[in-house]
Image (cartoon, rainbow, N blue to C red):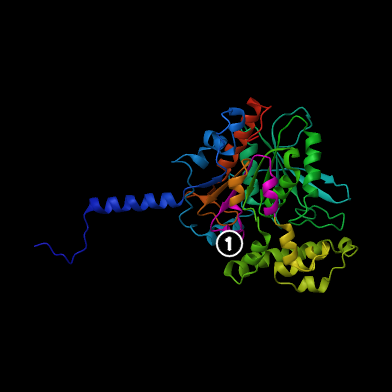
Amino acid sequence: MFDYRMPYSDPAFSGISLLGSMRKYSNRCRVQLVTATPNVSTGDSTHDENIRTLLEAHCPSLTDAKQACMKPTPFLRGGMLQSLYSTMRALKRDKYSDISYDRETKILSDGGTVSLDWYPARGTDSADARPVAIVMSGVGGSSYEYHIRCLSKTLGKDGAGYRVVVMNHRGMARTPLTSPKIYNASDTSDFCDIVKYIGTCCPNAPLLGVGFSLGANVLTKYLGEQGADSPLTAAVVICCPFDMSLTGRSLDADTFLNNNLYQPHLVATIKRFFQRNSEILQNSPTNYDWDAIMKATRMSQIDTLVTARDYGQRDCWEHYRAASSTPYVDGIRTPYLAINAMDDPVTRFEGIPQAKFRNNPHIALALLKHGGHLGFFCGLRPKIWYLTPLTEFFDAVLKHKSKAPQLTLAL
């Protein structure tokens, strides 16, 4: 007699249940693409194309039903684990990241210095028409971070057809600090100067922008400020902190990741920066409280003591509000792709201005369920997911421009 107390263990039923679970998991890992709806009212193809139609035609990793999916590495399924793994891997060298840069030092108009790390080597042929991707790191970061080396190798490898130049901020990556000015999430002037300089050095090359975290905020602000006059052909930002106030509160929260990873690392980086450059910073017109800076334990304290004081602001929270790139998103007229994770513990999902992406036909947002902050590791052997959509996007925009240079997206 059949015992109804025994669990049902029909292999076929178990297989169907497993398949259903796998499909549900795959659906949860699908890319959510946020863009404006293509305008089809004019009936004129030269005016009907916007970034959505471009992505659907050329970027399967963002739009194809089978390919637009980011399944995280099985042991890195949470945002905290993805973020932690990204930080731990910062200096690792493997087949995806093992490169050597060609360094160039550039003195800016105010006497400040940034270093430019080229991959492959810059060369001297001004007629070289290969596109140049100008990259900015996050706070305390540099060209030597794992994700930036992976990006550089992906774009700069034989056959890809790109050149990469990473702009290391003032005083970072062994770049001497030659003026009292310090980089921050609000000031776009250094990037503006470097874009102009590279445009002069490479007059035949399309210029592209890539920003990570703080660098993503600067790049977004720059594009909004420039509007239709931007010299960049396309841009991609990873983990952009559109709402700096929300990012500041996230970093200031009493959490394991903040207390044991982000805060100690970032605060120590800034303190070393001040100690290393004490001679020139002590001559700054900003009257820094050195004792308070050296005793600080949170980035909110550092930003109140340093960045807010530089701008004559009351505290870090006033600075974060002023530094946020959200107000500039409406003004972007360059093909622009933002990639963010919903489980990012730093650049919180709630701060992403999704409505602005639905109203600006030049920009797109790729939202992922998993990825953490600057992680996005997938596969059994962790590999960075966004390198494929980033390359597809740049290829698509450049192809569109070369076929119809007189047209722009969503006129």
Locate the N terminus by quadrant. bottom left
Farthest residue in the top direction? 403
Does dot 1 land on a helix, a strand or a loop? loop
The crowd level at tag 1 (other Cα within 10 Å; few <14, some 14-19, many 20+) is: many
Q: Which residues are magenta?
A: 325-354
Residue at the disc numbered 1: 345
Locate the C terminus by quadrant. top right
Establish if 141 lies above or below 205: below
How far across and how far down the image is residue 351, in percent? 61, 58
> Residue drawn at (80%, 34%), measured in percent from left and top?
201
* 213 sits left or right of 367 in the view: right
The kind of residue on which mark 1 rests is Pro
> Residue drawn at (75%, 36%), measured in percent from left and top?
122
Q: Is residue 233 magenta?
A: no
Establish if 209 lies above or below 15: above
* 13 sits left or right of 3 in the view: right
How far across and how far down the image is residue 334, in percent? 68, 40
Between 146 and 49, the one lying in front of the other is: 49
Q: Choose top left, top right, bottom left or bottom right for residue 195.
A: top right
